Image (cartoon, grey):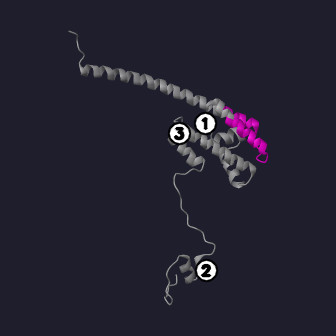
């Protein structure tokens, strides 16, 4: 008759094996994370250096804006990196994200602003699709969309602005506007 391994002994052995492998895998994962972080820092530092060499974009030169934008998106595709507004600003335009946003706010009708807004929509769509296909963390994508692409998951209702304020309306005008039944001769308190 064979020796049978008691369940308690088997559990102890499996648990010990699991703990040993867990430490091994964690060490490898931590080492891998460290290498990924180092690579990302080096890549970002190189991009910053290259943007300094390229100089700042001239937003009055729409062809330069478009060329730099397309080059940035192609570089992201080749390097298999998600594009971002910060990357677009620093890598393509040679400015900070804050400077880009200030330009967009100060020049809402410029040709460059209209094109950059389209580019931002493309980047948002790339992130959305990545999240939908489980290629990117959905929570991180939602955060990005809300904070950098003016997306929202709520509807804000604002009061309707009327051309003439209520102060200039008579009681009859207010009653008609709000379809109230006003009986002739009734007194309404003044506000």
- Residue 41 x, y percent position in the rendering: 61, 32
Let me know if residue 62 is in the magenta part: yes
- Residue 165 x, y percent position in the rendering: 60, 75
Q: Is residue 11 depicted above or below 136 in this figure?
A: above
- Residue 134 x, y percent position in the rendering: 51, 36
Judge depth for marks 1 and 3 and give the one in front: 3
Give the CA separation, mark 1 to mark 3.
14 Å
User: Which of 34/117 is in front?
Assistant: 117
Judge depth for marks 3 and 2 and give the one in front: 3
Of the numbered discs 1 and 2, the one sitting upstream in the chain is 1
Give the CA separation, mark 1 to mark 2.
55 Å
Is label 3 in a helix, a strand or a loop? Answer: helix
Horizontal arrangement in the rendering, residue 60 relative to residue 148 (left or right): right
Residue that numbered label 1 is attached to: 82
Give the mark count. 3
Is label 1 in a helix, a strand or a loop? Answer: loop
Q: Which residues are magenta?
A: 45-73
- Residue 53 x, y percent position in the rendering: 75, 35
Let me know if residue 140 is in the magenta part: no
Horizontal arrangement in the rendering, residue 49 relative to residue 185 (left or right): right
Query: Which residue ends up furthest to the top in the rendered image?
Result: 1
Of the numbered discs 1 and 3, the one sitting upstream in the chain is 1
User: Which of 189/91 is in front?
Assistant: 189
Residue that numbered label 2 is attached to: 168
Give the CA separation, mark 3 to mark 2.
53 Å
User: What label sits on residue 156 in the rendered view?
Assistant: none
In the image, what residue occupies the spot 76% across and 47% down? 59
Residue that numbered label 3 is attached to: 132
Q: Is residue 59 depicted above or below 14 in this figure?
A: below
Is label 2 in a helix, a strand or a loop? Answer: helix
Q: Residues within 10 Å of mark 3 (few under 14, many from 20)?
A: few
């Amino acid at each position: 008759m064979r020796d049978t391994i008691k369940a308690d002994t088997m559990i102890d052995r499996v648990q010990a094996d699991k703990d040993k492998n867990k430490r091994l895998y964690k060490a490898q994962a931590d080492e891998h994370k460290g290498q990924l972080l180092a690579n990302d820092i080096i890549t970002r530092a190189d991009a910053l250096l290259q943007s300094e060499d390229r100089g700042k974009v001239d937003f009055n030169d729409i062809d330069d804006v478009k060329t730099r934008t397309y080059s940035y998106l192609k570089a992201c595709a080749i390097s298999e990196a998600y594009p971002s507004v910060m990357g677009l600003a620093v890598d393509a335009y040679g400015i900070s994200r804050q400077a880009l946003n200030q330009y967009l706010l100060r020049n809402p009708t410029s040709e460059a602003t209209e094109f950059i807004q389209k580019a931002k929509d493309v980047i948002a769509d790339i992130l959305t699709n990545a999240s939908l296909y489980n290629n990117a963390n959905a929570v991180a994508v939602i955060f990005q969309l809300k904070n950098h692409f003016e997306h929202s998951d709520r509807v804000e209702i604002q009061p309707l602005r009327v051309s003439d304020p209520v102060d200039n309306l008579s009681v009859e005008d207010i009653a008609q506007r709000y379809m109230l039944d006003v009986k002739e001769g009734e007194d309404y308190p003044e506000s």
